[in-house]
Amino acid sequence: MNTTHDALTIENLVKKYGEKTAVDGISLSIPKGSFFGLLGPNGAGKSSTIHCITGIATITSGRILIDGVDVQEEYKEARKLVGLSPQEFNVDIFAPVEKLLDYVGGYYGMSKAERMERAEELLTRFDLQEHRKKKFQELSGGLKRRAMLARGLMHAPDLLILDEPTAGVDVEQRHDLWEYLREMNKNGKTIILTSHYLEEVEALCDEIAIINHGKIVAQGSKEEFVKDGSSLEQSYLAITKGDTD
Amino acid sequence: MRVNWIGIYTMVRREIERTFRVATQTLLSPVISAALYIFIFGYVIGSNIQEVAGVSYITFVFPGILMLNIIGAAFASSSSSLYFARFTRGVEEILVAPFSYAGMMFGYMFGAVLRGVLVAILIMIVGLFFGAVTLANPLAFLFYVATVSGIFALLGMFVALWAQSFEQLTVLNTFVITPLTYLGGIFYSISMLPETVQFLTRLNPFFYFVDGIRSSMIGISEANTGIGVLVILGLLIGLAILVTYVFKIGWRIRA
């Protein structure tokens, strides 16, 4: 890991779908080791930004660097540095969970021994051992979400992007997952979290940015968002409502 | 950066495992279809037909039946695999992984070629029971099986990206591949055709696929081998470049 760069640098990112501008000139720097919350209403541009970072979407203009590596010019190197747990289940629904992990590990160039060891670790960590032979489509919503997380972590990326990672996950599992994420962050992983559960963002993140209409409308430390006795939710609503108005 | 060999191997392994997961559809179906063709056209009808191009009808027709099924298997493998991955967005697993665009193309192509080869082996076994299998030039045989499988694997990938529905996925197969294959001389020698139709047949690239594999098996060719090899390699390389390019621009897979 290069220590001289931010974990993620976004410079004037624009993403258009035809005539529609989803991301409108965002610039952002996320230092290594951050637990960063990316908030915004539906359609604000969060997922589009994430898709540009990970390669799911093309970039209209601007530049994205992961640990100093350009995601367009050095895309293969950049892909290794980032892991994604997406909002939607983008997966072969007929494949068993253990196979999903095995295949993804292979895609990232991991040897068979590395894949087996890592998959065992993740299946255990996310309580998926008894479900490992089940097809993805046979899992409950919460189990699917955990399988997606395990898949995103398979190649042990330095930067982890979690797009609504606890949607459909029950309270106990959500708190268990929070502990795991805190532990990973403590061990040096940079995490970007988008969530509609603002108490989750408040509990986990140290830095927060709010996107609306494709632009960053507020950014700062968590403390800045919850000062004067306001909750994050109150601050968020005040900012997005004011911005919409 | 080095080639992601493990990644490409994993794509191929995944496709082969998928092939065996639905073996009735992917392996058994073409074998039964080929066995029926061999039995009816080669054995029942063929026994009442004089020699064609100096060999028994079953020997003449078997390479064409083999090629028909190889083409179908390779095309079905890559088109269904990639279209389904688009449909479920599972293709994003490939997009976010450290593959070069050529690596993505090779991963899908090799998986489909291997299915074509598997189907070829199974049909050869069936052909042995009917005494229809001869191999005049095994290396040329492998060349034709691998390259023609490659062409239809690539074509299947392009169609999988182009298609917006399951119906469109079958359009090319129904209206182009199947008619041109049947008109490419599977069941007859072009010497049986009027001269004008012979000329038109020589413009059909499928004629060179069928003639190539036939010449490698029975040692008799009705086409110019050099032109045939050029047509096959030209299509293979041209389609490989096209598919790599569409992966690069993310046509219909990257938003």
Image (tube, grey):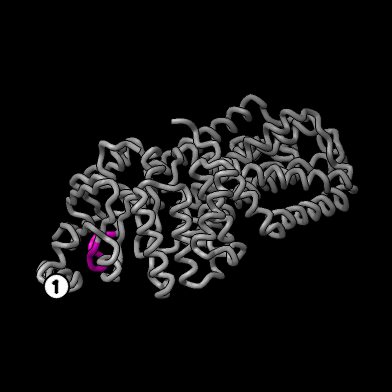
Q: Which residues are magenta?
A: A39-46
Seen from the viewer's position, the closer of residues A166 and A19 is A166
Identity of the residue drawn at 47% across and 31% down: B2
Whether residue B144 can be seen here: yes
**What's the amino acid at mark 1?**
Ser
Instruction: Report helix, strand or loop for mark 1.
Output: loop
Whether residue B172 can be seen here: no
Pick the quarter of the image with the N terminus of chain A: top left
Q: Position of residue A160 (x, y in %)?
A: 36, 52
Seen from the viewer's position, the closer of residues B110 and A241 is A241
Q: Is residue A43 magenta?
A: yes
Q: Is residue B146 magenta?
A: no
Q: Position of residue A113 (x, y in %)?
A: 59, 44
Q: Is residue A136 left or right of residue A84?
A: right
Q: Pinpoint the chain carrying mark 1.
A: A
Q: Is residue A49 left or right of residue B65?
A: left
Q: Position of residue A239 (x, y in %)?
A: 13, 68
Identity of the residue drawn at 49% across and 59% down: A91
Seen from the viewer's position, the closer of residues A42 and A37 is A37
